[in-house]
Image (cartoon, grey):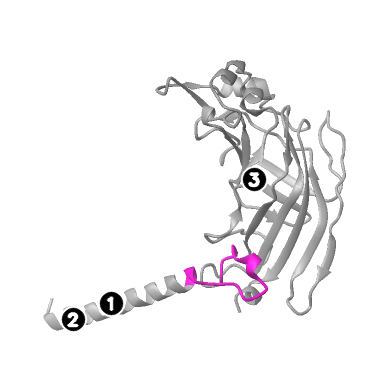
Amino acid sequence: MSSRLRRKLLVVFTAVAAISALAASMASAATPAPGFERFAGCPSATENPEVVECLYSIIKSGHFEMGNKDVPITNPITMTGGLNNTLGGFSANSQGGLKPVKQQVPGGVIGLTGLDWLVNFLSLEGLKLYAVTELVGQPQVGEALTLPIRVHLINPVLGSKCYVGSASSPIVLNLTSGTTSPPPPNTPISGTPPKFTANPETEVLAFKEGVYVDNAFAAPGANGCVLTLFGFIPISINSLVNSTSGLPAPAGTNETVQAIDLELAPENRVYP
């Protein structure tokens, strides 16, 4: 290869690298317009050209009953991201997704495992158990809000990978503000349709004060729960967690009620 050709190729590669670096910096530096800061988790057109609507939602309160455990939602959970023109294809940048928010589980780790002797080794704080909801699939926004999730059970006794649900076996919530149609023994329950408003100046569509319900979902058994004795002897306690917590729990035996506010804004208004 001639030195002249090498110089030309070097110029081309340098230019491509510079353009790529500029595009990357623009994507990571995208900042919502004033008044749209809450949509920051939505990818800009540079990050994902498929996004046409930006989503902001917040679960304000409610409860999540799975097996024989009923966890109150006391700490609000936000979810932000972008949707395509069918209100599917959910995607999020580094600031988006479903925020990991701890909810305290009544009964703590002893109530989950039945290991009463733990009270002799753990402080009051160490006995507390927390649940964190995590997305493991694509949310869908429509007549129902569909969320494929897993629940991370957090306490040092359980190890760092104790979950109910997984990407291959998720808990699929179909949250509706209408009336459910669960299999028995559950009976139908009803939510509350949200109040709809549209802001002609910002083009933001708001769905506020809605109560969304689902009591037709199934919950799989626990996985990855490991008790480590004396710091070096790991013992699986999945079966113990399952038997104490009533898992796996078939459809018709679980329930969630969630008060949710949701907003949609055109991507080109969030990132003009």
- Residue 169 percent location from the top left of the image: 60, 37
Q: Measuring 66% from the left and 37% from the top, which residue is drawn there?
A: 104
Q: Which of 218 and 72 is in front in this view?
A: 72
Q: Of label 1 and label 3, which has the lower sequence position?
A: 1
- Residue 68 percent location from the top left of the image: 73, 27
Q: Which amino acid does label 2 sit on?
A: Arg
Q: Of label 3 and label 2, which has the lower sequence position?
A: 2
Identify whether 54 is placed above or below 227.
below
Instruction: Report which quarter residue 37 is drawn in.
Output: bottom right
Looking at this view, name the residue that lies furthest to the left. 2
Local SS, label 3: strand
* Residue span colored magenta: 27-44
Q: Which residue bears the numbered disc 1?
A: 14
Q: Of label 2 and label 1, which has the lower sequence position?
A: 2
Q: Which residue bears the numbered disc 3?
A: 148
Local SS, label 2: helix
- Label at residue 45: none
- Residue 89 percent location from the top left of the image: 61, 59
- Tell which tag, 2 or 1, sits nearer the viewer: 1
Identify whether 133 is placed above or below 229.
below
Give the crowd class for mark 2: few <14, some 14-19, many >=20 residues within 10 Å: few
Identify whether 36 is placed above or below 101.
below
Mark 2–mark 1 distance (CA, rounded to whole Å): 10 Å
Q: Nearer the viewer, residue 28 or 17?
A: 28
Mark 1–mark 3 distance (CA, rounded to whole Å): 43 Å
Question: In the image, 250: left or right of 28?
Answer: right
Q: What residue type is labelled 1?
A: Thr
Q: Which residue bears the numbered disc 2?
A: 7
Q: Which amino acid does label 3 sit on?
A: Pro
Instruction: Report which quarter residue 130 is drawn in.
Output: top right
